[in-house]
Amino acid sequence: MMHTLKKSHIFTALLAVLLVGFYTFEFSSGEASLIQMPDFVSNTDISPASQKPVGTLADFNDAIVDVATKTRQAVVSIEVTQTVERPQTPMSRFFDIPENYQRQGLGSGVIVSQDGYILTNNHVVAGASSLKVHMQDGSVHEGEIIGRDPRTDIAVVKIDAQNLTALAFGDSEQARVGEMVLAIGSPLNQNLAQSVSMGIISAKERSIGILRETGGYENFIQTDAAINPGNSGGALVNMDGELIGVNSAIASASGGGNDGIGFAVPSNLARYIMESLIEHGEVRRGYLGIQQGGQVDATMARALGLERAQGVIVGSVEEGTPAEEAGLQEGDVVISLNDNPVRDWMSFRSAIGTSQPGDTVILIVNRDGEEMEVEVTLGELPDELQAENMRDQQQQPNSQQQMQQELGFGVDQLTARIAQQLNLPQGTEGVLVSAVRQNGQAAQQGLQRGDVITRVNSQAVTSTSELQEVFRSLQDEGTGYARLRVLRPVQGGSPTVQFIALEL
């Protein structure tokens, strides 16, 4: 089972290649808290890569064969059955056609404990009415879902078995770009179970947008090892024979096959999610307590006097949160997290949300041109915020995505500090244009990044949600166009007023 990512329509293409495309059924994980934590100890006897002498090409080949032979024993196929309700029509009732039917899908999984705990993807098992786990030796076991986490696409399955071959966890933080890896899983169908492909780690900390609808957290390892539909939940293994990733998604220009761009959930994150589901019956997430105020592109960097186009802008700081206690302020620019550059809001949010409550993080913040270090002890994301954020992520990105697709631009909140840096009149309210798609309608009509939209037709807009609501209303009314009043910053001078019309 595998997500697929097309060049322009990410979500549509991903869903098009799901062999079992459902995210609706939520298994109760309350019983998971009663389960004793398993001992995640591997029993695969694999020498570390540093201890394998390679004097000839045959030695090199044998070393890879040794890793593949021993690790593939811990990779299973997961056959999923879902009970689907059939829409009832007068014809179906006349012929007494059953109201429900069974739908099958296939994915992969990785045995990580000798007593039967298996890591896989949430999208492999979501909505399943039954699971069958196919082992390498041909035996088949009934699988039980211990817990699922749609936000990281990780799930835990348990089978009733002992003395299984379990794969050792590696440290995904230590994985290096360019490092050789093996991808193991069941591509396309059960007849191809435990297939092995080889490649390298192409990149780390990738955020590709496939989990936005669940309010997800993405921090993928990218690899060019061949991954295809059905590989989801399979193992990404290093040359020490350790699990460093759970294969989750592919990018494909053709819409279904391998193009050498695959993505895996890092093993450190997958292990934390797994242990949290087993021990607590839920996933406990780190909480900072800020809202996004914009991202720093080249235009914003110049406006703020920053040397590099890097970081996220704090839009607001919630009262009584770790962010407030640490002294973060509206307008601060967070440029690094634990010595890692902050590229964008999604990667920063993922890094916080996949941290554990109680973790201490070090932020480098630019405030009014001065850099400072801020130490924050993360809290725990409240349950109500988890639910609220999920609803927001389901609604806001879809609205933003629709706006970017149809009109060709994206927006962020305009904070008081950004308005000051852009030399806008005091008290200016509006929405900052954060991205303009090349050759899109907005670009053709003259809209630019850094513009501030203050009115649409005769209605003032003060937030991104208001702007989206205005556009929805105009579309519902069939107005046919939107006339934007825009303030365009001028370096060293007062902003100019522009009027731009867009067809709806």
Image (tube, rainbow, N blue to C red):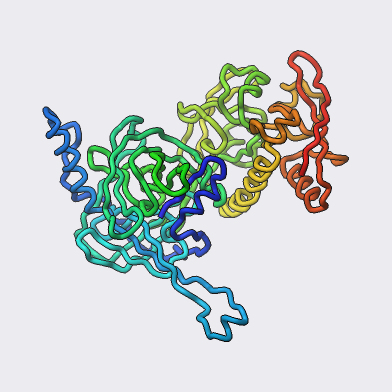
Q: Is residue 392 left or right of residue 123?
A: right
Task: Find residue 411 and report its horizontal and vertical position in percent.
Answer: 69, 36
Q: Quadrant of the N terminus?
A: bottom left
Residue 293 vs 494, above or below: the answer is below
Q: Name the one closer to the observer, 72 or 188.
A: 188
Residue at image location 83% in from the left, 32% down from the top: 485
- Asked whether residue 275 is in view, the answer is no
Task: Find residue 106 and report its horizontal and vertical position in percent.
Answer: 37, 60
Task: Find residue 396 and report its horizontal and vertical position in percent.
Answer: 65, 47
Q: Quadrant of the C terminus?
A: top right
Residue 268 vs 150, above or below: the answer is above
Residue at image location 58% in from the left, 23% down from the top: 309
Q: Work out which residue is located at the far right of the displayed protein and give it.
A: 458
Task: Find residue 49 and report its horizontal and vertical position in percent.
Answer: 20, 34
Q: Is residue 121 left or right of residue 181?
A: right
- Asked whether residue 54 is in view, the answer is yes
Q: Is residue 278 left or right of residue 478?
A: left
Q: Name the one closer to the observer, 99 or 76.
A: 99
